Structure formats: structure tokens, C-alpha cells
Amino acid sequence: MLADAIAAERFRLSRDRTALFWGFGFMPLVAMLFSMAGDVFVRIVLRRGMPGETTVDLANRAMGAVAGASGPVTALFLLIGAAAIFAGDYRWETWRLITPRNSRTNLLAAKLIVFAEVAAWSLLLTAFTAVLAGLFGSVIDHGRLVAPPDGSAFPGHFAGVFVITWLEVLLIGVLAGLVGILTRSTMGAVIAGLVVVFVQSTLAATMQATTWKSLAIPAYGGRILKAFVAAPDEVRPEAGPAGLALVLLLVWLVVLACGAVALFRRQDLTKE
Amino acid sequence: MNFALEAEGLVKTYGAVRALDGLSLRIPAGGVFGVLGPNGAGKSTLFRIALGLVRPTSGTARLFGNPAGQTASLRRVGAMIETPRYPPYLTARDVLRMLAMESGATGSADIEYWLERVGLGGAADRKAGTFSVGMKQRLGLAAAFFTRPELVILDEPTSGMDPAGIQEIRALIRDLAAKEGVTIILASHQLDEVRRVCDRVAIFSKGKLAAEGDVEALTGGKPRLRLTVSPVDKALAVLGAKGEPDGQNAVLADVLRAETPALIRALVEAGVEITEARWREGDLESAYLGALEPADRKNEDLVDAR
């Protein structure tokens, strides 16, 4: 039953090319193009090169791009994708077509799972386009490709940063889902979600001390967590705050997802 | 007797509006059941409750004996509620593929057959967002039928269709009910459609059941021959128990179509002049308006009393 709902949701999103492109493909691609254009501008238009030997660490470049993929600008586009998935049925008035065919819990769970899936692909695309941009830059600047300094530990660091960013992105998606169900509007999901993302990013930027309150702000908690998992062993910060940040991030996810499911299960679908 | 849909004391309120006001109704399995009523009578609300789209304020609704809204019961049901809408980026074929997946019926649903059957074979790969209202209705019908449900709920299925399309869909509904044993609940504002297609009818008024019964019983039985004649009393004498006056210069004859030539011959031989003879079909409109009248009159009385 859940598998049926996931298959249907995945099929449907695969046909919604506008939402796929703007929600999950645009930012990685535009970031790559900006990076390439910047390299071209510096090298060809300004006719300047980097003094000394230039090195390009593609692995860390990919990890940095992934770590930054939960920022407010990327969030705007993720919210567009999430709103299309979670609130599209209100916009197109299609709940009446779908709801009698599967349980409401399955329908919403399928949307959450498909969003999680496509968000992971988007992060992988971010890493891939960062590598492409790095390769392009190395050619333009005649840079030498180098391995990451942390060597064999890098895959673990990358996986950690990837998972933390993915959880942050999921939180943005689940928030859009909850607001979309509450407002029955794709626009509502995007705008309300964006306000929350900007507010928490601003708050996180002003935080000085690491307390349970600051860690409860997902953007700050995510930053602490990424710093923890990506740091070399010898300078790794304490595990306590990072652990608490992870727990709080998961609590946020579970609370918002359960809230969305509970709300949707009780919602009257009169005129979607 | 098996019931496809049962409602008992159903109440649904939207703020101050009482969409259903203690509605009780049992729709038997098999045949075509018509639901009539003016706008706001509660037809769509009943269907939405049955399909689990809306929760009743009080009362119960059951599909095939199980509480309405349960997925297991709903998978035995196909429905088209109001004007169907689709994600505009999906083609007609994609809409049915997505719905088949959602229903867990990818193996059994015959998408190509149903697209052809509702006349959308040539538009199967067109985006649903470009469809006319009539084409959307056709796709909605395919979506309601293509998983081979035991019960199909159709809310205004022919609105927006051309006359030829309406004929096709009526034939399809009768065919499915007669040959495949599908129970069909049909809500319509077109009384003629209901009279032609349905076996039984329920008339809703202000969220309540105003009347229910066989179409023939509600419309006053089988068709009768109306004769404009002179003199009327001589014609009534020939007709005997089978005749009754209908106005000053006409009579209604309760005879079979095969008996018509003999009756006209007998009337002419008795010296009755016949200026017009035509069959009067069962009059559902009168039954419909009659069923609605008491509720409306009650309200007028209340207003007058104030």
C-alpha cells in the first residue's frame, strides 16, 4: 500500500519537470555556472591568474558545496519543489481523485519519502556540479588537482556532512508540507517556509554561545554538527553539543512530520 | 439484501450551514441509483463522506457494510465527484497510470481499453491541462471505471458533454450495470437522464431525504396515451376503467402501445373525433418538484409566521 503510493508519487514527480528543475536542479546548476563564469571573468576578462602554483581540491570543494546547500537561497528553491509535492494537490484540486485510492497516512508518507529521495539526488547533483566547476577552474587557472588533506578519513567526513545537510533539507521540506496542508496553498508553503528559514538563519548567525536553546535552532545545530563531523580528529570539538544538536534536529523532523500527518488525516477535503 | 451505500442520521455542518441534516438512506447493490436534488441539497456532501474526503459531524456512513473512508472498502469503489481536475503536466494515459499505481492495480487496470471506451484513444498522449470540460469528464469516467470497481459514484457525469457524448455515456452506464453487475450511483440535475438511466431514485432537499423509490413508482407508473378528443364523455365511455379525463378536451388512456390501433379504431367507430394522440412518459419533473415542495412550503410558512 505504501509502496503503491510511493510509486505513484515518484511517477508523478518524474512528469512534473518544472518542479523538478526549479526545486532540485536549478541551484546546483546555477552555482556551477556562476563558478565557471567567475573563473572565466578573472582569467580572461581581467587577465589575472593566481600568484604561485594553484591547487584545486575537488573533494573538499564538493563537500563545501554540499554543506552550503541548506542555506536560505537554496532553501527558496527547495521550498518551491517541496510545495509542488506537498501542496500541489490543493492547487490542482486533485485530492478528490487520489484520496479514495490509498490511506491518507500512506499518501503523505509517500510524499515525504519521495521528497527525501529527490533531495538526496539534488545534494549529489550539487556535489557533482561542484566537481565539474572545480575541474573547469583547474583547466582555466592551470591548477593542479590535489587529494584532500584528511586522505582516507574524507569519505566519512563527506558522508557525515551529506547526511546532516540532507536532514536540514528534509526539515525545510517537512516544514513546507505542514504549512502547505495548513494553508492549502503552494504559495503559502513557500512564503511561510522562507520566512522561517530566514529567521532561523539570522538567529543562527548571531548566536555566540552553544546552549540547548541555540542548538534547537536547526541552522545553528546543523552548523555545529557539520563542524564536528568534518573536523580532523586532532581538532574535533566536543561530541556533547553535536549529539544534542543531532537529537534536536531529529526531534524537529519527527514533530513536524507527525504534525503534518495528523493534520492531513483530520482535514476535510471539501473544495481543495 | 446487500447495500452498497448506507447512511444513518448523517449530519454535516460547515459553520452555520447544515449540508446534511440527519440523512438516512440505503442504496442497494446492483442497478443504477439516481440521486436528485437542487444545488446545496447535500448530494456531493454525501458522496464526499462516503469516499472519506469529508468527516461527518454526526451519524454514520457505510460502504458495503464497512465504515466509509476505509481504504479496503474504497478500493471497491470508483468515483467522479464534481468536475474532475488533473495535474496539468500529466497526459491522459499518465493520469490513469498514476491512479492505477495509487490503487495498487497496475497489473489489472486496462488503461488502453478504457481510454478507447470513453473516446479518448486519440488524445491519450495529450496533457490533461489542455482538455476541454467534456474531455475531462470522459477521463474522469475512465478513472472511475478502469480499476473494475463494484460501485461507481458519478456526480454530474455528462455535464459539459456534447449530445453524442451524453448518449454514449448513458449507454455505457446502462451497459456496465446490466452486463457487469456494477452498482452505479448517479447524481444529476438532468431529470430526463435520471429517468432514462436509473432504476431507483432518491430526491434530496435541504440535506434530507425528500422521496425515494422506483423511477416508475415516483413518476406515476408506465407511459400513458393522451388523446385530445371530442366529446370527452363518449371517449371515457369507450375507455371504461382504463381512461380518465385530463383537462376539458383530453383523456389519458392506460393502455399498452400494441393496443393503440385497436383503441383508436374503437373510438372512431363510436363517433369520437380525435385531433391529437401522443404518449406521455412518466413525469419525473412533477415528482421531483412535488417532493421538494413540502420543505419549501414549510419554510415559506415559517417566514410568513414571522
Image (spheres, rainbow, N blue to C red):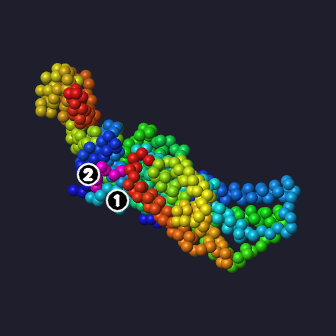
- Disc 2 marks a residue whose amino acid type is Gly
Magenta segment boundaries in residue numbering: B54-62
Q: Give the quadrant of residue B148.
A: bottom left
Q: Say if A133 sits above or below A269 in the image.
A: below
Residue nearer the viewer, B9 or A262 = A262
* Percent coordinates x, y for residue A16 in the rendering: 57, 54
Give the chain letter at badge 1: B
* Percent coordinates x, y for residue B167 in the rendering: 40, 42
* Percent coordinates x, y for residue A253 in the rendering: 50, 63
Say which mark, if any, is on residue A272: none
- Mark 2–mark 1 Cα distance, whole angstroms, equals 16 Å
Residue nearer the viewer, B227 or A11 = A11
* Percent coordinates x, y for residue A206 in the rendering: 61, 58
Instruction: Provide the secondary structure element on which disc 2 rests.
Output: strand
Q: Give the quadrant of residue A54.
A: bottom right
- Disc 1 marks a residue whose amino acid type is Gln
Residue marked by disc 1? B70
Residue marked by disc 2? B59
Instruction: Provide the secondary structure element on which disc 1 rests.
Output: loop
